[in-house]
Image (tube, rainbow, N blue to C red):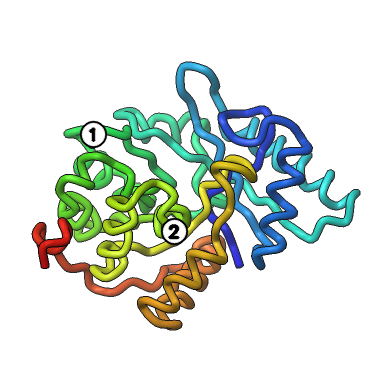
Amino acid sequence: MIDIHCHILNNVDDGARGIEDSLAIAQEAIKQGINTIIATPHHRNNQFLNTKNDILEKVSYLNSIFQERKIPLSVIAGQEIRIYGEMLEGFNRDELLPLNSSRYVLVEFPTSSIPKYTNKLFYNLQLEGYIPVIAHPERNHKILDDPNVLYDLVANGALSQLTAASLCGRFGKRIKNLSENLIEANLVHFVASDAHNTTNRNITMDEAFNKIEDSFGRSVAYNYIENAELLIDDQMIIKDMPTKIKKKKFLGIF
């Protein structure tokens, strides 16, 4: 299994603090059947800046540590990019890093909003050959209030990545319910851990995939697993026609 969103790189963001934390995340991932992780440190905020070349260097070093210790896990390079208006310029300056240097770009929204320029930016990214993958949309307040905001983005070519812990109820019942509705509406294309540690932000992939198989069927779970493989090979992923979510159903009235 491949985890396409994980903060396993140490001392770069709010994920692993030291190499021992990276090793702990790796061991937990292996227990859950993961053999490949895309390291996706946050690109930037007020506290840190992680550019493409820095990430590539640190991923190479972490892989060398794993090889020395005979840890059967491969780490490949990616980046979680907080959306900003000059993203295309960031790619042109070679600062930004798609997932495994593919066409797929992991984009994070602010927690409480979606910028008004998002549709235009996503359109321009796609014109340049990139495909936006929206990180953890189920935890965005705007989408929580109106999940069809995500429908509009997906209908226009974006993809989305659900956090395993959200489906397992770690972020509360409301986010869990929305996660299930997004899967049912074909608005989820990947499931990833977004793990930051092995305590309060851990892997949780095995539990999430068991829930998906039980609630939506084995074929849905397999599609998510295959999509992660297709992503790192820069192939077109499997997706079904998205549908809108009725607000009454989302709120649990139906």
Kind of residue sitting beneath label 1 = Ser
Mark in front: 2 vs 1: 2
SS at mark 1 in the image = loop
Instruction: Please provide percent x and percent y for residue 61.
Output: 78, 39
Does residue 179 show up? yes
Q: Nearer the viewer, residue 214 or 58?
A: 214
Task: Indicate which disc, 2 or 1, sits on the residue closer to the N terminus.
Answer: 1
* Residue at the spot of label 2: 168
Q: Quadrant of the N terminus?
A: bottom right
**Distance between mark 2 and mark 1 Cα atoms:** 24 Å
* Residue at the spot of label 1: 113
Mark carried by residue 140: none
Relative to 31, does residue 7 appear above or below in the rendering?
Answer: above
**In this rendering, would 250 be left or right of 76?**
left
Q: Nearer the viewer, residue 3 or 54?
A: 3
Which image quadrant is residue 88 in? top left
**In this rendering, would 170 be left or right of 38?**
left
